[in-house]
Image (tube, rainbow, N blue to C red):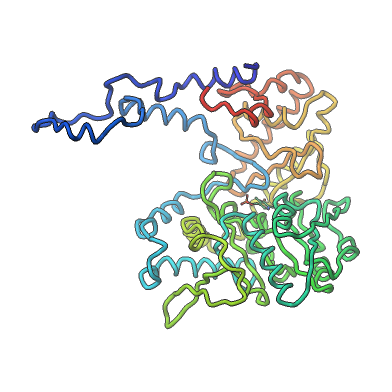
């Protein structure tokens, strides 16, 4: 057992497994003595049960409460994980999703008994179209990457329908990693393009490589550097001119809700991450939802079933002969849709303000920290800002060291070493839900860490020290996870 492994085991062993807490004969409840005879046949039927520990109710409650306290979430503190939009999601939206009528709805019920659920979906579709400025949408995809795959299938179906055989997709170096993966999964060859020194893509760069064998481009806007692709109109023009389509990765919608009309930017297909922007946290391990919006000329390729209105009632129709087919069992992850609709209705026109505050907060952090952290692109950012560890390298302190030290200061670390185009990247996304005081505290913590990097670098190399678990050997932890201590 190496050092790293031992320390994990030691830390976790402070909270024993329920099996170790159990004592033979202990029970979680007591019932009055039964007044009938034992029936031996029952024992026989029961047979040998699973080896559950004998524990009391308080044993169980304390065990799980302690485990829950080992976790860090948006409910515990600021979670500035760039690219993930880990904002606070109001509990009211969870409450709506938990309404009995929704949780009890069965996907196999006929449409006439599911009018309420279908109305929720139809209404959400309308709102998403209004927010994005697109023409038609599917709610089926279960995540952002799944939306990308759906979008690529739609792009492929569109070209096939028009009798054109296209094999390539242009993908800028600032795209999210899932973009090339989704394109490749669809059989497209990805053609990388490099962004300019200002961190955004030039239209000429795209025009140069766009040809009639290229199906289109996948562009993340705002891009993964947190910068708005300002030449998007010209880029879209260059792609359309050669018969291609523009796929917009809209996972960063939190920066532009009610501000940018994506349809008017020349984007033909766009996915959203409801589990980032619309009141479900990203990375929570729970269900997600990555709706795909398209312009009119692509609507007939959307997955089926689609929600239609028929004789004043909502219905599900499979009658779309050009559709790419189903991409999810039933209709997608319904509870995430309920939360999104509840969020949109409760925010109303404040959605725009949410984006404005998200952008303001990121720019505030950028300005406050640029004296202590190297800022590779010193220009106004959108909802997240990207620094590097260049200034700390002279003290042999890396991005990883600083991120780990933030844990000691009570923060979830930002996204690190992403985007890949920035060496030693530290990507901070504060979101709109943090107050100025919280953000100021975070800034002070980072300044203190920069100070430590200069004067007591050893402290950082050992971080985190305040948590239950010290620095892990990340390779070892990934290859040989030690789950039981
Ligand atoms: C998060 C993200 C994705 C992928 O979304 P998942 O739901 O995690 O699959 C794609 N693109 C960008 C820009 C993202 O931030």
| Up-down relation of residue 102 to residue 70 (above or below) | below
| Up-down relation of residue 32 to residue 154 (above or below) | above
Q: Residue at x 71, y 68 (%)?
A: 156
Closest to the observer, 357 or 125: 125
Percent across and percent down for residue 264 are 72, 71
| Quarter containing the N terminus | top right
Closest to the observer, 412 or 215: 215
- Residue 468 in the figure: left or right of residue 223: left
| Up-down relation of residue 287 to residue 22 (above or below) | below
- Residue 125 in the figure: left or right of residue 297: left
Percent across and percent down for residue 164 are 78, 74
Percent across and percent down for residue 289 are 56, 56
Closest to the observer, 83 or 368: 83
Quarter of the image for residue 458 reads top right
Q: Residue at x 81, y 42 (%)?
A: 422
Percent across and percent down for residue 342 are 47, 59
Q: Residue at x 51, y 29 (%)?
A: 70
- Residue 87 in the figure: left or right of residue 455: left
Q: How many marks?
A: 0
Quarter of the image for residue 311 reads bottom left
């Amino acid at each position: 057992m190496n050092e790293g492994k031992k320390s994990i085991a030691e830390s976790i062993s402070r909270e024993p497994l329920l099996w170790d807490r159990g004592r033979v004969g202990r029970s979680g409840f007591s019932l009055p003595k039964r007044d009938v005879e034992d029936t031996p046949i029952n024992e026989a039927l029961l047979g040998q049960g699973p080896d559950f520990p004998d524990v009391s109710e308080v044993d169980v409650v304390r065990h799980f409460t302690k485990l829950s306290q080992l976790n860090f979430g948006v409910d515990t503190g600021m979670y500035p994980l760039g690219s993930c939009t880990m904002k606070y999601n109001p509990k009211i939206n969870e409450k709506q999703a938990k309404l009995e009528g929704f949780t009890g709805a069965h996907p196999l019920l006929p449409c006439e008994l599911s009018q309420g659920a279908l109305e929720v979906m139809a209404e959400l579709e309308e709102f998403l179209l209004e927010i994005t400025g697109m023409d038609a949408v599917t709610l089926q995809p279960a995540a952002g990457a799944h939306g990308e795959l759906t979008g690529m299938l739609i792009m492929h179906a569109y070209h096939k329908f028009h009798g054109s055989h296209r094999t390539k997709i242009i993908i800028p170096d600032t795209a999210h990693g899932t973009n090339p993966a989704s394109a490749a999964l669809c059989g497209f060859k990805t053609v990388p393009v490099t962004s300019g020194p200002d961190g955004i893509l030039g239209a000429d760069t795209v025009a140069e490589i766009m040809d009639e064998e290229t199906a289109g481009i996948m562009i993340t806007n705002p891009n993964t550097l947190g910068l708005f692709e300002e030449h998007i109109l010209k880029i879209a023009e260059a792609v359309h001119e050669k018969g291609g389509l523009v796929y917009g990765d809209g996972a960063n919608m939190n920066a532009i809700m009610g501000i940018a009309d994506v349809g008017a930017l020349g984007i033909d297909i766009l996915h959203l991450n409801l589990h980032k922007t619309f009141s479900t946290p990203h990375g929570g391990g729970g269900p997600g939802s990555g709706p795909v919006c398209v312009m009119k000329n692509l609507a007939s390729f959307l997955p089926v079933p689609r929600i239609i209105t028929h004789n004043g009632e909502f219905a599900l129709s499979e009658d779309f002969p050009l559709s790419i087919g189903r991409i999810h069992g039933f209709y997608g992850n319904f509870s995430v849709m309920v939360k999104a609709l509840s969020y949109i209705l409760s925010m109303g026109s404040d959605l725009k303000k949410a984006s404005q505050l998200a952008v303001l907060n990121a720019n505030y952090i950028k300005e406050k920290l640029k004296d202590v952290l190297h800022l590779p692109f010193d220009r106004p950012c959108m909802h997240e800002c990207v620094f590097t560890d260049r200034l700390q390298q002279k003290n042999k302190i890396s991005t990883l060291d600083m991120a780990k030290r933030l844990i000691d200061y009570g923060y979830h670390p930002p996204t690190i070493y992403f985007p890949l185009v920035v060496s030693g990247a530290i990507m901070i996304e504060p979101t709109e839900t943090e107050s100025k005081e919280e953000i100021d505290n975070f800034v002070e913590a980072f300044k203190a860490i920069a100070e430590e990097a200069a004067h007591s670098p050893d402290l950082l190399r050992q971080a985190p020290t305040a948590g239950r678990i010290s620095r892990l050997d990340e390779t070892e932890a990934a290859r040989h996870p030690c789950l039981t201590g």
